[in-house]
Image (tube, helix red, strand yellow):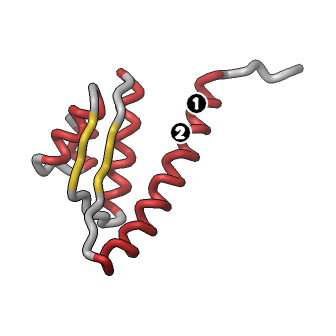
């Protein structure tokens, strides 16, 4: 019996890979830029209900204590970014 192709499973797998590489990159950038005195910016995209995928990213950034100096976003990413910019944590945004 063949497994039916499930676009949602593929989407989740792709997003988790992107999230992993994003966080790995941000971790490496944080260490490299701290020594150089550079800033870190975060851009969050839109996408309706998929915009909720930004919340785990923000929670992970909080847990890794990666400071975000600039944040921008569109649609749901803009909403999540605005809440984060005014001081809400990723966990608090999840509970809203």
Q: How many marks?
A: 2
Placement of the C terminus among the 4 image quadrants: top left
Which mark, residue 2?
none
Residue at the outermost left position: 86
Q: Identify the image quadrant of residue 83.
A: top left
- Pointer 1 local density, CA inside 10 Å: few below 14, some 14–19, many at least 20: few
Check disc 1 and report its element: helix, strand or loop.
helix
Q: Nearer the viewer, residue 17 or 56?
A: 17
Residue at x 86%, y 21% (from the top left corner): 2
Q: Identify the image quadrant of residue 76.
A: top left
Residue at x 24%, y 47% (from the top left corner): 71
- Pointer 2 local density, CA inside 10 Å: few below 14, some 14–19, many at least 20: few
Identify the residue under disc 2: 15
Q: Are marks 2 and 1 in contact (CB under 8 Å)?
A: yes
Residue at x 41%, y 66% (from the top left corner): 29
Q: Nearer the viewer, residue 95 or 81?
A: 81
x, y (%) of residue 21? 53, 54
**Position of 64 compared to 68: left or right?**
right
Residue at the outermost right position: 1
Q: Is residue 38 above or below residue 10?
A: below
Q: Identify the image quadrant of residue 95.
A: top left
Residue at x 27%, y 25% (from the top left corner): 75
**How far apart are the alpha carbons under marks 2 and 1?**
6 Å
Identify the residue under disc 1: 11
């Amino acid at each position: 019996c063949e497994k039916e192709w499930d676009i949602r499973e593929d989407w989740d797998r792709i997003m988790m890979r992107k999230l992993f590489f994003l966080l790995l990159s941000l971790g490496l950038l944080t260490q490299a830029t701290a020594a150089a005195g550079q800033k870190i910016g975060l851009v969050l995209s839109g996408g309706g209900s998929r915009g909720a995928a930004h919340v785990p990213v923000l929670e992970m950034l909080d847990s890794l204590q990666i400071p975000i100096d600039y944040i921008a976003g569109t649609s749901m990413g803009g909403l999540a970014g605005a809440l984060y910019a005014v001081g809400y944590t990723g966990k608090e945004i999840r509970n809203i």
